Image (cartoon, helix red, strand yellow):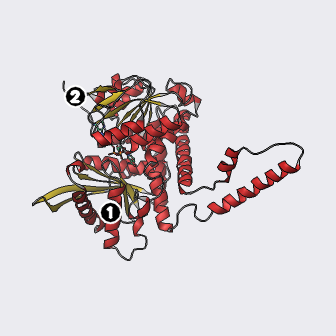
């Protein structure tokens, strides 16, 4: 059966943008200035390998430079195209504004199937692509700072940082040219888990607000909630792992490239992740039911659906069949504009991508600050904090021995209280704070304005208002 006519990813972002600006009072022309993508650079470059020259096509789109540097991931996937990177760059502008990361929006991509090349080939391709972008300042600590996205991770970021430093040997801030690097190459603790961790913090915050829980037709807490995850990559795995091991949620199904596995009693996420790494897919995972047509599981009964793979997976043809009352968009653009309307009409609450997956850019911001300040977070104050806590504990223990009342501190309290915050604790604390604050900025608009029908429109309103203020301050 032919699929219903859907807007493209970029058209979807534009439709959602238009829906929000219709509720705002922006000066003529400013709306257009904010919406358009400032520039997109396309590069075609050759790499000699396997006895021939292979030509690759890559992009770097800069959506808005109201703040610099601009920021956004680099994606390695066969489906990468200009429309997609521009849509993703626009989302980055709004996402950074919403979580108050001081950046404009950008995004990059390379049309490649990374699984078709070995490590040494991938390094040569990545370095060559990085070279093309660096020489045009499209990778630069003060102008344009990439990060990982689909198909890229710490390894690629380390190659990019090294390539920049080879080409800019006297730039003392060279490490800040890219984020998401390994900790031993200038990265920050907690970056790899950050986006999935942010999804967890977003859900925790949602479940602190009874009226929002009720709006989704749910009740109670995250404990015992049935969760379906699509894509057990970086974002999906960390979200599923933390929700199931720390919040008592049950991941009842995981959808991957080669199909889906489900178990109503809950899947062991770490065992499943290990299985995928070893076997290349979910098929054959023990203690679970396998379904070759994985996308069917997007429609299965659950409390929370987490699409964490790619865009456009919930579209006009399957939206009506999706039964989840709450969807959190861990991936960028997993719900098309058409599907969004169908789901909202059914009463489904959608926690939008712009907010839901902002954990990655938030911790990237911390990494960039760490690189510019050349010191690890917590290094100066950790022991001093521990010493002050020790003073209080010693004093409490002295009082307890001197007084007639016989009481002691529980050992658990002592170990927890005496431990000063290291980099990971500080990163998690900063991320949690950011996700809570941004949720409330967005949700307050949703709850308090009758003309704002959903969290996505509310998120756009908050973000566009911040970008507009920043343009106004520049005199535009
Ligand atoms: P990833 O490459 O680590 O993981 C993607 C996963 O999806 C893989 O396990 C892959 O096998 C699976 N997948 C691919 N096609 C699929 C399909 N058709 N059906 C089911 N599963 C499929 O990528 P990631 O970094 O986890 O990114 C996932 C999404 O999150 C993307 O939309 C990305 O833009 C977004 N995102 C990522 C970050 C980050 O920090 N990595 C930050 C913000 C947003």
Q: Which residue is mark 2?
A: 3
Marks 2/1: CA distance? 40 Å
Name the residue: 23% across, 59% down.
120
Closest to the camera, between mark 2 and mark 1, is: 1
Q: Tell me residue 62's x, y (percent).
A: 33, 56
Residue marked by disc 1? 160
Compared with 149, 307 (above or below) is above
Q: Is residue 124 left or right of residue 67?
A: left
Quadrant where the image shows the N terminus:
top left
- 10 Å crowding of disc 1: few (<14), some (14-19), many (20+): many
Decide which of 100, 430 is in the foreground and name it: 430
**Would you say residue 7 is visible in this rendering?**
yes
Residue 227 location (% of width, % of height): 44, 30
In the image, 74 versus 438, the foreground residue is 74
The residue sitting at 15% across, 57% down in the picture is: 55
> In the picture, which quadrant includes the C terminus?
bottom left
Q: Secondary structure at mark 1?
A: helix
Contact flag, marks 2 and 1 (Cβ < 8 Å) = no
Sooner in the amino-acid sequence: mark 2 or mark 1: 2
Q: Residue at x 70, y 46 (%)?
A: 411
Tell me residue 270's x, y (percent): 41, 39
Query: Residue 173 occupies which quadrant of the picture?
Result: bottom left
């Amino acid at each position: 059966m032919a699929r219903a006519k859907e807007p493209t990813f970029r058209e979807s972002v534009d439709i959602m943008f238009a829906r929000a600006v219709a509720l705002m009072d922006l000066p003529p022309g400013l709306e257009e200035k904010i919406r358009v993508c400032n520039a997109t650079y396309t590069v075609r470059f050759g790499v000699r390998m396997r006895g021939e020259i292979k030509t690759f096509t890559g992009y770097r789109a800069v959506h808005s430079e109201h703040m610099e540097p601009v920021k956004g991931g680099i994606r390695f996937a066969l489906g990468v195209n200009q429309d997609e990177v521009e849509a993703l760059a626009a989302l980055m502008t709004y996402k950074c504004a919403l979580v108050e990361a001081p950046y404009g929006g950008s995004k990059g991509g390379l049309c490649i199937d990374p699984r078709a090349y070995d490590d040494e080939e991938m390094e040569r391709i990545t370095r060559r692509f990085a070279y093309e972008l660096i020489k045009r300042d499209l990778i630069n600590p003060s102008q344009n700072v990439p990060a990982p996205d689909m198909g890229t991770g710490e390894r690629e970021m380390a190659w990019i940082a090294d390539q920049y430093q080879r080409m800019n040997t006297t730039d003392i801030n060279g490490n800040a040219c890219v984020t998401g690097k390994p900790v031993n190459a200038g990265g920050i603790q907690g970056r790899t888990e950050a986006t999935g961790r942010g999804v967890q913090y977003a859900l925790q915050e949602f479940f602190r607000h009874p009226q929002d829980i009720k709006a989704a037709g749910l009740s109670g807490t995250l404990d015992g909630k049935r969760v379906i995850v699509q894509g057990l990559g970086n974002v999906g795995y960390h979200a599923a792992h933390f929700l199931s091991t720390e919040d008592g949620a049950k991941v009842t199904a995981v959808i991957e490239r080669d199909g889906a596995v489900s178990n109503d009693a809950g899947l062991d996420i770490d065992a499943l992740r290990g299985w995928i790494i070893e076997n290349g897919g979910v098929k054959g995972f023990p203690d679970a039911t396998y379904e070759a047509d994985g996308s069917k599981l997007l429609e299965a009964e659950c409390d929370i659906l987490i699409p964490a793979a790619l865009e456009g997976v919930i579209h006009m043809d399957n939206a009506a069949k999706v039964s989840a009352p709450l969807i959190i968009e861990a991936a960028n653009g997993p719900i098309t504009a058409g599907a969004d309307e169908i789901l909202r009409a059914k009463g489904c609450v959608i926690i939008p991508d712009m907010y839901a997956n902002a954990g990655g850019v938030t911790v990237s911001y911390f990494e960039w600050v760490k690189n510019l300040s050349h010191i690890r977070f917590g290094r100066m104050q950790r022991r001093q904090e521990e010493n002050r806590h020790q003073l209080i504990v010693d004093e409490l223990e002295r009082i307890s021995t001197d007084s007639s009342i016989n009481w002691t501190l529980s050992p658990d309290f002592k170990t927890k209280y005496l431990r000063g915050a290291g980099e990971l604790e500080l990163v998690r604390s900063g991320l949690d704070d950011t996700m809570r604050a941004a949720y409330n900025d967005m949700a307050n608009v949703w709850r308090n304005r009758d003309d704002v029908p959903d969290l996505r429109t509310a998120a756009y309103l908050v973000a566009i208002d911040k970008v507009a203020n920043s343009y106004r301050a520049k005199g535009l």
